Image (cartoon, helix red, strand yellow):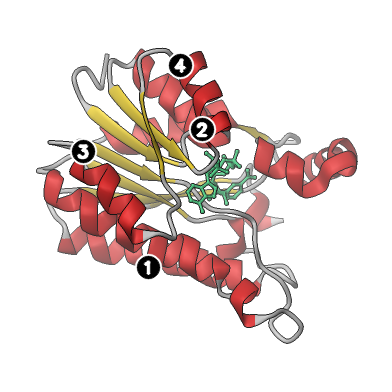
Amino acid sequence: MQLKNRTVVIIGGSSGIGFATAELAQAEGATVVITGRDPDKLDRAAQQLGAVRTAIVDITNETDVQQLMLQLDHIDHLIVLGASLASGKVVDTPLQELTRPIHERILGAVYAVRHAAPRMSDGSITLTSGLFSTRPIPGMTMAATAVGGIEAMSRALALELAPIRVNAIAPGYIDTPLLQAAFTDQYESVVKAQAATLPVKCIGTAQEAARAILFLMTTRFITGEVLHLDGGGRYV
Ligand SMILES: NC(=O)c1ccc[n+]([C@@H]2O[C@H](COP(=O)([O-])OP(=O)(O)OC[C@H]3O[C@@H](n4cnc5c(N)ncnc54)[C@H](OP(=O)(O)O)[C@@H]3O)[C@@H](O)[C@H]2O)c1
């Protein structure tokens, strides 16, 4: 019970990596708060988890984020996962769409940190980077820019917010609804092809990502770190 009586807030906790983290944190004794934008999805997640607090939060809306944090007396661990896979080619894509990764990932993390950190005395914040920070692909330049920024933000905040620890996870291909939605009916073949290119010969699971987040939450001597969960994907 590594998180007994700790309050863990997971922005983007209604599916995928966030949901798996909520399950694991509960099993470790935490009081868990999960958020999402879609109320039905959030309700289904809450029913599966049982004793969990929920809040509708769009991370691009600072007021949503502020309202959530105002309801909480104290926060021990904050995990910021909520974001879409938006991007598009820099030259062809309307600016509003192009800047979405910046709004969701950079400003979203800033909103979360600004309103959560004053309610934290120590504990940890885990932000979300991704494989694009080290292995960019055409059409995902703004997502790569945003996740690269998140890695820099984690290091800088580790100093600025100390003794609160700040780290990031950088997932590669992880089997979640986000990935399934991205590839729809080609999902199985994409997963098979990706797995074959990786040193580990499989893609990751949400539970494996959750265990990495738990490690960052519970390891007192780790801060300003980026933990890669990509099956070696950035080297091939
Ligand atoms: N799966 C992968 O292969 C992979 C790889 C690299 C990075 N990541 C990153 O890891 C994070 C979690 O991904 P996942 O695969 O677990 O995705 P997921 O299953 O789609 O879960 C995303 C969660 O975030 C919420 N969310 C999405 N957009 C949001 C927004 N604008 N504001 C607030 N909440 C939002 C979703 O609920 P609602 O839709 O109801 O809001 C859901 O709870 C994302 O940042 C993703 O980019 C994933």
The residue where tag 3 is placed is 71
Residue 49 image position (x, y, % from top left): 45, 16
Tell me the distance, in whole angstroms, between the alpha carbons under discs 1 and 4.
Answer: 33 Å
The residue where tag 1 is placed is 152
Query: Which corner quadrant of the figure contains ligand 1?
Result: top right
Tell me the distance, in whole angstroms, between the alpha carbons under discs 1 and 3.
Answer: 29 Å
- Looking at the picture, which amino acid does disc 2 mark? Ser
Q: Secondary structure at mark 1?
A: helix
The answer to whether residue 193 is left or right of residue 40 is: right
Q: Secondary structure at mark 3?
A: loop
Q: Secondary structure at mark 4?
A: helix
Between label 1 and label 4, give the one nearer the viewer. 4
- Looking at the picture, which amino acid does disc 4 mark? Leu
The residue where tag 4 is placed is 49
Residue 153 image position (x, y, % from top left): 34, 65
The answer to whether residue 190 is left or right of residue 207 is: right
Q: Which mark is residue 14?
A: 2
